[in-house]
Amino acid sequence: MSEINRGLFINGAFRDGSEGKTLDVLNPANNQLLASVAVASIEDVNQAVEAARAAFDQGGWGVAKPKERARFLRRIADGIRKNLEDLAALESKNVGKPIGDSRWEVNAGAELFDYYAGAILIHGGEMPPVSAPGIDLTFRQPIGVVTCIVPWNFPFLMTCAKVAPAIAAGNATLLKPASYTPLSALGLASVAQEAELPAGVLQVLVGPGGTVGNAMVEHSLVGKISFTGETTTGTEIMKKAAEKIGRISLELGGKSPNIVTQDADVAKAASSSPMSVFANTGQDCCARSRAFVHQSVLDDFVNGFIEATKNLKIGDPLDDQTEVGPMISKNQRQISLDYIALGKEEGASLAYGGTIPSDPSMVDGNYLIPAVLVDVKNTMRVAQEEIFGPVLCVIPYKDEATMIREVNDCRYGLSGSIWSENLSRAIRIAKAVESGNLSVNCNSSVFNEAPFGGFKQSGIGRERGLYALEAFTEVKNVFLSIDSQFQS
């Protein structure tokens, strides 16, 4: 798969858009042209929806046996692994992601298809006890045609996290990747085509959210929308879905806390935490961008954190040694620079980084040295608004109750970490923090088998695990009377 087909993927085949328009895709490491891809029109969206509905109805995907659908998912998983190096290189060139991270994410995408190939075999209904004489059954049935819209920061992984459970559950799926990063989604379409996934089960449409995305959301035959992206767009999608009472799942922004208590292993927390906020160059809704550090360990943590950050290798995404690559665009980098300046205006101090590297090999790319802001107050805009860049805000605290109140004084509630050697304290804080996913003494809290999603304005619904299959199905209840005299 050294060459990716750059057309729209509709009804099992690649083709040009009906209006002949194309979109230039840039490499964020040097801002050079990487590819030109076909752009969908409203007519293309309508044709894709019709093809999806036909696959669901006439094609039989909606009533196919789970083991049959599982067979196709396993083929796709095998195809992803077969093309892992090509897909990973494509992801790194398109996103600016270090190649080691891309390899991990592509493999994780394959594991998602494997997981749902197995999970769909055990996912089903129940037999709830009822008060009437008879048997009550619940069934899980696919919704029909679903739209999945994925962001530019984890395009391949998020594509797999939505498409795998959607088609496993029996839905026909429309996928819209972000305009910045469409290439790995087209790569997945090639894998699906090679796996002989029935035509119409997966469509991939590239184009602006304001036209193509809206059409994919508003179409009357689309019964479910699954969106990952920023909160403003999610709000608009929610409004559009409400107009037709459409099912919806949203995974939106975050301003996640990294809580370092007085009894934490400070050395471990300081050395591990940089990658909790600077991985993917901070372009991660789960980034632990607010560090709440107990006053008694503040200096040790900040000094250790900065030292570990200095040792991070910034550079070419295709270099195996690189840990931090470029940001997706110059505009996204400027947003981070503006927030750093704003933080200083608000009274914070820039303790490290926050500048553009002078290395000649990076001048043409969208690189930014990760920034550490100290003396931050939780009321500052830099502590409240999602920056989506490599910027850490360090907020000291003295007592646990005040810290928890400040952690929760935020419109987001997606993720977070707690560092403590006191298990009772860690669990107490975890229960009190208003967040959907928390980790203790580590950075990771996302697994294929476990639910993922946020509180408050970080979203609605859960992805991954069996929760994702529930999100892509409807519940039907059937009562079988065994008493001929029973009246409803």
Image (spheres, rainbow, N blue to C red):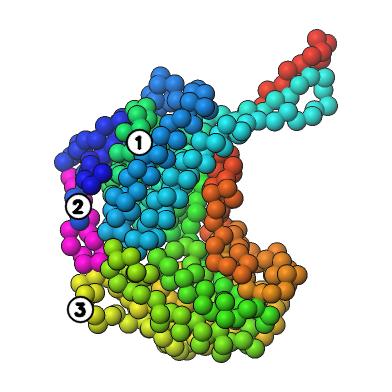
Name the quarter where the C terminus is drawn: top right
Alpha carbon of mark 2 to alpha carbon of mark 1: how far? 21 Å
Q: Position of residue 369 (x, y in %)?
A: 35, 78
Q: Which residue is mark 1?
A: 192
Using residue 422 as the reference point, say whether residue 28 is left or right of it: left
Q: What residue do we see at 38% from left, 55% from top? A: 103
Q: What residue do we see at 40% from left, 82% from top? A: 310
Q: Which mark is residue 360?
A: 3
In reply to whether residue 32 is colored magenta, the answer given is yes
Could you say which quadrant of the image residue 397 lies in?
bottom right
Using residue 185 as the reference point, say whether residue 63 is left or right of it: right
Q: Amino acid at mark 3?
A: Pro
Q: Position of residue 395 (x, y in %)?
A: 56, 82
Alpha carbon of mark 3 to alpha carbon of mark 1: how far? 41 Å
Q: For the residues carrying marks 2 and 1, which lies nearer the camera in this image?
A: 1
Q: Residue furthest top?
A: 484
Q: Nearer the viewer, residue 219 or 62?
A: 62
Which numbered disc, 2 or 1, marks the residue that appears first in the sequence?
Answer: 2
Q: Is residue 349 above or below residue 200?
A: below
The residue range painted magenta reads 21-33
Disc 1 packing (10 Å; few <14; some 14–19; many ≥20): many
Q: Nearer the viewer, residue 94 or 409?
A: 94
Secondary-structure class at tag 1: helix
Which numbered disc, 3 or 1, marks the residue that appears first in the sequence?
Answer: 1
Q: Amino acid at mark 2?
A: Ala
Q: Which residue is mark 2?
A: 35
Q: Position of residue 117 (x, y in %)?
A: 51, 36
Magenta stretch, main secondary structure, is strand
Q: Nearer the viewer, residue 308 or 52?
A: 308
Name the quarter where the N terminus is drawn: top left
Using residue 410 as the reference point, say whether residue 18 is left or right of it: left
